[in-house]
Image (tube, rainbow, N blue to C red):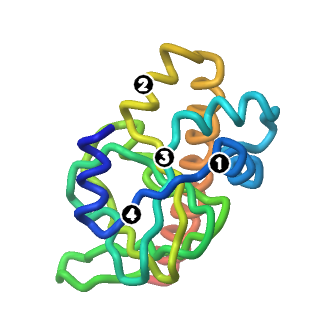
Amino acid sequence: MEYLRERLERTGLQRIEMSLQEKTAVLEKSKLGSGMGWQELQTVAGFCAAYVAQPGVTICRQGELSDFLCLISKGRVAIVKEDLHHTVKEIASVGPGQTVGEMALIDGEPRSASVVVQTGVTLLVLSDASFERMAEEAPRLWGKILLRLAQTLSKRLRQTSGILAEYLAES
């Protein structure tokens, strides 16, 4: 976790102290924490660290190996992708209660897009090391989180497939 903290701080994120209660409240308002009881949310919160970042900070870059997920507590981030001509295009804007980095947390592959802070943000960060520790210490809860992440990814894939189908129909 110390390695991740140093890496995040090099990118411009700053670790902050946030109580377990505050982190639990953030999770309670999120899609990741929906349907969970307070005790479960507190357990998940114990595996997360809190960070802040200012506008313009790139949290992670397309193509880099990365090993964490971010839950947006406050503010907004842009999901940007470089096309074949190296033109950067914003493909989404993500705000409070939403997550970024699900794929990297699950498959460990390089980032498929970059995440850039649009307005000052507060984030809860779940590292792959903490996620693995959760699997050992709270396997049922880990399974619930994994299912939520799969549902999020499935929803995004359906949206992307719909957009692609419309694009192909216009071509």
Helix or strand or loop: what does disc 2 sit on? Answer: helix
Badge 1 amino acid: Lys
Q: In which quarter of the image is the N terminus?
A: top left
Pointer 4 residue: 14
Asked whether the viewer can see residue 157, the reply is no
Work out whether mark 3 precedes mark 1 in sequence or the reverse, and give the earlier one.
1
Disc 2 designates what residue?
Answer: 132
**Residue at 29% across, 83% down:** 88
The numbered mark, 2 or 3, whose residue comes first in the sequence reads 3
Quadrant of residue 61 within the rendered picture: bottom left
Badge 1 or badge 2: first in the primary sequence: 1
Q: Earlier in the sequence, mark 1 or mark 4?
A: 4
**Label 4's element?**
strand
Say which of 136 and 108 sits in front: 136
User: Which residue is at a point 40% across and 40% down the rendered structure image?
Assistant: 127
Q: Mark 3 points at which residue?
A: 49
Q: Do the residues labelled 3 and 1 touch (CB within 8 Å)?
A: no
Tell me the tag on residue 23: 1
Judging depth in this view, the residue of 71 and 92 nearest the camera is 71
Q: What element carries label 1?
A: helix
Disc 2 from disc 4: Cα separation: 24 Å
Between marks 2 and 4 in the image, the one whose residue lies nearer the viewer: 4
Question: What amino acid is found at the position of numbered circle 3 in the picture?
Answer: Ala
